[in-house]
Amino acid sequence: MFSSLDELSDEPHSYAIFDWELQQDIALLSPNPIYRLILNSFNDLYHRMALQYFENSSHRSISKQYYFALLDSLLNGDIEGTEKIARSMMKNSLHLWKKQMNGG
C-alpha cells in the first residue's frame, strides 16, 4: 500500500491518486465487502474534492507526514496507535478542509 510513497511527487494530482488508492487498499482489508462497493461510488466526487484539497501545499505536507506516521505505526504493529493516527488525521483534515472552504 505504501510502496510508491517515496516517489510521491509534490503536486495535487499525485496526492489525490495516492490517497484514493490508499483508501481503496484499506477498504479491501475490511471484513465488510460492501464497504469497498460504497467507497467506489464516491470515486469521481473524491477526485474532484481531493484535487482542491491537495492544491494547498501545506495539506500535501501534512498528508505526507501522516502517511509516514501511519506506515511506521503499522510496521511496529501498533494497531491502537495506528487508529489514533488515522482518527487524528481525519479530524485535522476536516478542520483544514473547512478552513479552506471558508476562504483560508
Image (cartoon, helix red, strand yellow):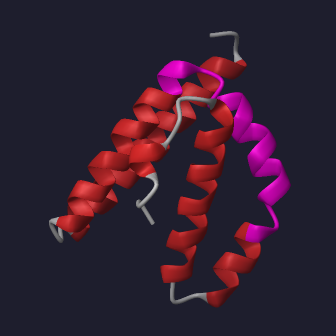
Q: Is residue 77 above or below residue 65?
A: below
Q: Is residue 21 above or below residue 47?
A: below
| Side of 40 where 59 appears, left or right | left
| Side of 24 where 26 appears, left or right | left
Q: Which residue is situated farthest in the top direction here? A: 103
Q: Nearer the viewer, residue 88 or 50?
A: 50
Q: Quadrant of the C terminus?
A: top right
Quadrant of res 76: bottom left
Magenta stretch: residue 22 in it? Answer: no
Q: Give x and y (percent) for residue 24.
A: 61, 68
Q: Give x and y (percent) for residue 41.
A: 82, 67
Quadrant of res 62: top left
Q: Is residue 37 above or below residue 19?
A: below
Quadrant of res 64: top left
Residue at horizontal 22 percent and vertical 56 percent from the top: 72
| Side of 100 where 96 appears, left or right | left
Q: Give x and y (percent) for residue 71.
A: 30, 57
The residues colored magenta run 40-59
Q: Quadrant of the N terminus?
A: bottom left
Magenta stretch: residue 47 in it? Answer: yes
Q: Give x and y (percent) for residue 70.
A: 32, 54
Residue at horizontal 53 percent and vertical 35 percent from the top: 9
Residue at horizontal 59 percent and vertical 20 percent from the top: 56
